[in-house]
Image: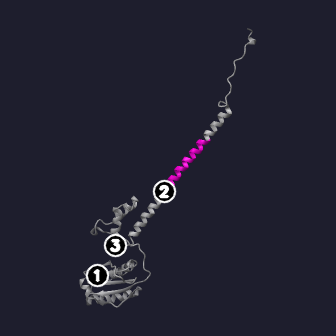
Amino acid sequence: MPEDDKQAPAKPAETASSSPVVVNTIIGLIGIVAEVTGTGFFNSLVERQKAKNELRLERHKADTDLVKLALQAPDEQSRIASLRFMVATNLISDAEIRKGVSAYLPSSPASQKQTIPYLGPKSSMKGEIQMLALGQSELDFAEKNAEALKSYGFSTRPPKTDERLKKVTANKVVFFNSGDLYLAEEIMAHLKAKGLDDVSIVYSDRNEPPGYVEVLLIKTPPLSK
């Protein structure tokens, strides 16, 4: 048979899946899907981390508010007891706050080196003071210092002796409303400046008007000439 009569081998038919246009289209679609999927995954991670941070901040604020609430107790021992309870029961969940509170609290009354501050509301009144004395020397000290306290803006009732003080063992500044602690602290600072070193602040739940503070004088230093 002459060579011219030989037929050329048939080319394989081009299928739709092998078409360059189709292949490029599929590759493009795969790229788009990968990009969208990757972006969505990244955004999901960002949102999750954001939610965790917000939850952490809310927990931190809640723990801080708990500590502030404990510091509104009118007397120091109650503030210490409340903070110890919160630490022991893990009511304070923030580890750093719990560690800081625990380190600040005294292990015992004898080891206490700093005061546990009061953070409650303060009375807007300057205060009215009643000084009670055990005997004449204490009354003389009270009368002299009542006048000095007036010069600081306090209102003072006339000092007087009180037989009930025979049952009291130490000089005390007594306040009856939680907002009056700072008044008691001011009065105690003044008395210590006048030589009355043995004096402490005490809270009583007796019903008295805001701003009223009592000073119980059991033993006072000799008056200067």
> Real-space Cα distance between discs 3 and 2?
35 Å
Occupied quadrant, residue 86? bottom left
Q: Which residues are magenta?
A: 32-53
**Residue closest to the eye, 178 or 25:** 25
Tell me if 176 is positioned left or right of 10 in this view. left
Give amino acid for label 2: Asn
Give the mark, 1 or 2, whose residue is nearer the N terminus: 2
Q: Label 1: how many residues lie within 10 Å, few (<14), some (14-19) or many (20+)?
A: many
Q: Specify the color scheme.
A: one colour
Write down the residue under mark 1: 171
**Residue closest to the eye, 9 or 72:** 9
Q: Which mark is residue 76?
A: 3
Is residue 56 shown in magenta? no
Give the mark, 3 or 2, whose residue is nearer the N terminus: 2
In this rendering, does residue 172 appear at all?
A: yes
Q: Position of residue 213 (x, y in %)?
A: 36, 83
Write down the residue under mark 2: 53
**Nearer mark to the viewer, of 1 and 2:** 2
Occupied quadrant, residue 222? bottom left
Q: Position of residue 177 (x, y in %)?
A: 38, 79
Mark 3 element type: helix
Is residue 41 shown in magenta? yes
> Real-space Cα distance between discs 1 and 2?
52 Å
Which residue is located at x 41 percent, y 59 percent?
94
Give amino acid for label 3: Glu
> Real-space Cα distance between discs 1 and 3?
18 Å
Mark 2 element type: helix
Q: Position of residue 115 (x, y in %)?
A: 34, 71
Give amino acid for label 1: Asn
